[in-house]
């Protein structure tokens, strides 16, 4: 049950976002399109599934797009409106420049698929499609599905100026963030859940290395939640103690496991004395080479298994052992930090 808690929080947060008011909102209800486009939800879900198979960046990109839309004048899809010669729209605001294109692409393709069905054309709003897509990517990431009340009307106005002061800034302190989220009916817990997914979806424009890593990670035969975890770890975007200090400057940055050095991704998974002892023990037990100098070296070992097309049982096991080892270190670290549990290397 504890493993589902972050997902449950995200579902609760997303459904709360769905209820944020906008100036062009009709009465929301389930089955709103039953009479005119009864299969709209399955159509949207099919497009989201297809997009997800192409890249799992679809999940965070769509969620972050929904968040940025809802925080500016409600969930009206005004973030989808393009700029014109006389107007700079929301999507081109500096605060929205980091929104991943996969989120926009998901909504655009879903809208096209819906409009291609006789009777559905121009009947379903982009605002509702984005809300449904946000629900569907949560389900794809291993969370539960939930009913989405529909009937949102698309916003007709979109200006970059309207974004000012509506979205969290990197320089905001905890009190400022709490105030911003509270103004939208969200708690500090909601803020933490949403921020985790926002880190995940930060734009990787120009990062060819991550562009290569993403499809490889997705093809590995490991659970989806571990794929997401690895993707974050390889970008050094996990909420390690040094990363957390950006929001809580006075908080300790000391490694939870060894209690001696600053906890970074490199330290936690590679150089921490506890970690090296863990990899040594795992290597001795499995007979596999599991010593790494840095995160890049660890990645090279895992990617070489895939790039060589090694489909043997031994190759898959090697890959899964490393993935499971990283996951065990992370979950153990979290148990020590949040549940104050004792741990022993041999029990990892």
Image (tube, rainbow, N blue to C red):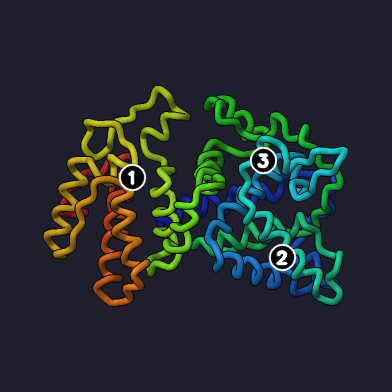
Alpha carbons under labels 1 and 3: distance apart: 32 Å
For mark 2, what is the residue?
Answer: 110
Q: Dividing the picture into quarters, in which one does residue 105 lie?
A: bottom right
Q: Toward the viewer: 25 or 236? A: 236
Residue 22 numbered mark, or none: none
Q: Toward the viewer: 101 or 342? A: 101
User: Label 3: how many residues lie within 10 Å, few (<14), some (14-19) or many (20+)?
Assistant: some
Q: Toward the viewer: 64 or 26? A: 64
Could you tell which of marks 2 and 1 lies nearer the N-terminus?
Answer: 2
Image label count:
3
Residue lying at 33% horizontally and 76% vertically, measured from the top left: 311
User: How far across and how far down the image is residue 265, in percent?
Assistant: 34, 42
Q: Toward the viewer: 320 or 70? A: 320
Residue lying at 76% horizontally and 36% vertically, measured from the top left: 160
User: Label 2: how many residues lie within 10 Å, few (<14), some (14-19) or many (20+)?
Assistant: many
Q: Dividing the picture into quarters, in which one does residue 228 lie?
A: bottom left
Could you tell which of marks 1 and 3 lies nearer the N-terminus?
Answer: 3
User: How far across and how far down the image is residue 307, in percent?
Assistant: 37, 67
Residue lying at 22% horizontally and 31% vertically, measured from the top left: 260
For mark 1, what is the residue?
Answer: 334
Name the element at disc 2: helix
For mark 3, what is the residue?
Answer: 96
């Amino acid at each position: 049950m504890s493993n589902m808690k972050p997902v449950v929080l995200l579902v609760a947060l997303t459904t709360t976002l769905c209820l944020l008011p906008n100036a062009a909102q009709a009465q929301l209800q389930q089955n709103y399109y039953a009479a005119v486009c009864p299969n709209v939800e399955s159509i949207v879900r099919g497009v989201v599934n297809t997009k997800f198979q192409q890249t799992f960046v679809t999940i965070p990109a769509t969620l972050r797009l929904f968040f940025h839309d809802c925080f500016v004048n409600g969930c009206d899809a005004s973030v989808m409106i393009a700029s014109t010669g006389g107007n700079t729209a929301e999507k081109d605001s500096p605060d929205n420049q980091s929104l991943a294109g996969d989120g926009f692409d998901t909504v655009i393709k879903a809208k096209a698929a819906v409009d291609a069905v006789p009777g559905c054309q121009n009947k379903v709003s982009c605002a509702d499609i984005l809300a449904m897509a946000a629900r569907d990517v949560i389900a794809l990431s291993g969370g539960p599905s939930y009913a989405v009340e529909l009937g949102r009307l698309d916003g007709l106005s979109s200006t970059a100026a309207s974004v000012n002061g509506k979205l969290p800034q990197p320089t905001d302190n905890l009190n400022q963030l709490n105030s911003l989220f509270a103004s939208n009916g969200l708690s500090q817990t909601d803020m933490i859940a949403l921020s985790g997914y926002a880190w995940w979806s930060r734009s990787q424009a120009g990062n060819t290395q991550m562009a290569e890593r993403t499809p490889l990670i997705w093809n590995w035969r490991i659970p989806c939640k571990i794929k997401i975890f690895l993707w974050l770890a390889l970008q050094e975007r996990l909420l390690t103690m040094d990363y957390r200090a950006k929001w809580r400057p006075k908080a300790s940055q000391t490694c939870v496991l060894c209690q001696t050095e600053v906890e970074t991704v490199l330290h936690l998974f590679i150089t921490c004395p506890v970690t090296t002892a863990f990899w040594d023990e795992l290597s001795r037990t499995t007979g596999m080479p599991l010593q790494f100098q840095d995160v890049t070296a660890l990645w090279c070992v895992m990617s070489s298994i895939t790039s060589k097309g090694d489909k043997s049982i031994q190759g898959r096991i090697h890959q899964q052992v490393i993935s499971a080892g990283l996951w065990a270190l992370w979950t153990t670290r979290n148990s020590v930090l949040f549940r104050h549990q004792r741990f022993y290397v041999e029990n990892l």
